[in-house]
Image: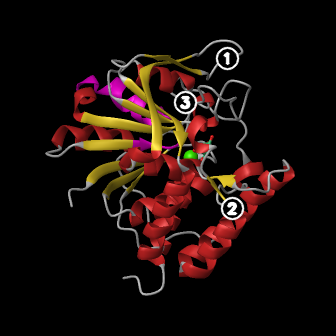
Amino acid sequence: MKKVNVIFDTDPGIDDAMALLLLHALPSIDVRAISTVFGNASIEDCTRNALYICERFSLPYPVYKGAGVTFAGLAETEYPDFVHGADGLGDVGFPLPKRRAESQSSVTYMIETLRAASEPIEVLAVGRMTNVAEALKQAPDIAPLIQRIVIMGGAVEVPGNVTEWAEANIYGDPEAAAFIFDSGVPVLMVGLDATLQHRMKKTALMSLRDQLGDAGEFLWHIKQCYLKFYADKGIFDGFPIHDSTAALALVHPECFEIRRGRLVCETQGGPRGRTVLTASEAGPHAVAMAADSEKLTAIFEAAMLAKYGAGSQ
Ligand code: RIB
Ligand code: CA
């Protein structure tokens, strides 16, 4: 099977952690490297979390540390510990990993890898888009070398999850998103319109805990924080798994309703971070507007069971 080469740009993060284990399990994906970005926690914590997951589950991917401030150079003052815990992984109390990040920055890695690539490479960005924007700014020649950027972020016809308009990954760095939308690189945006339609029930998580060995235990423990966040909001019928949904969109577009057009990201005033789609068949961007949760759940569970379940390699 011809695999899709992917650079995974991420801010782990509870749902990022699940997406990483999923990417490792999807037979049609070849993860080339992990690039970290601040967002769900500081860049130090997000990078440590990526290294911890790789070490615990023997994931062979190099980890490159990325941006700790926005594309415009702004530092974060508060991280969403009420969703992801103060450490970004649900405050379970994991030990420090022995593995270390590569010495190159993620931006340098992306530029050099794309320039040298003999096969198409896609970027899956499930945090702020700071690293990819920075790479494109420093090396505009890589734009035609990126096959596609698949992002988890944005909201078109549904409200945002940080402000009335804006989703967290876009709100955290609207200038980076705007830069990417203007770069000419094909984009598939998998935002809240689609990710809120693909939820995981607590019973499904319990069943993963019982069937996936250490991966199941890990997911169960880190997700407690996430379950509490949704329970506090009165949501008990399933929690979104945003970053895993975007990972699935990369190789299973048949599970999504896709609308083409041109995306713009607002950077000013109240709607800062709003993603606006002007629909047109010939548009350079694609947006997942709806998701088939039943099909996605079946693909997710089959891949995870095959990789981490009893009798897996
Ligand atoms: O809005 C959801 C997104 O914000 C997810 O990628 C989550 O991990 C956070 O980064
Ligand atoms: Ca994320």
Image coordinates for residue 149, horizontal then vertical, percent: 37, 36
Q: Is residue 85 above or below residue 21?
A: above
Residue at screen point 28% across, 23% down = 140
Extent of the magenta region: 124-141
Residue 171, quarter of the rendered image? top right
Of residues 109 and 229, the one nearer the viewer is: 229
Quickly name the residue at label 1. 271
Query: Tag 3: Cα neighbours inside 10 Å, few (<14), some, or many (≥20)?
Result: many
Residue type, numbered disc 2: Lys
> Is 75 on the left-hand or right-hand side of 103?
right
* Spatial CA span between label 1 and label 3: 18 Å
In the displayed image of the protein, which residue is found farthest to the bottom? 311
Name the disc covering residue 201, or none: 2
> Is 142 on the left-hand or right-hand side of 26?
left
Name the disc covering residue 70, or none: 3
SS assignment for the magenta stretch, majority? helix
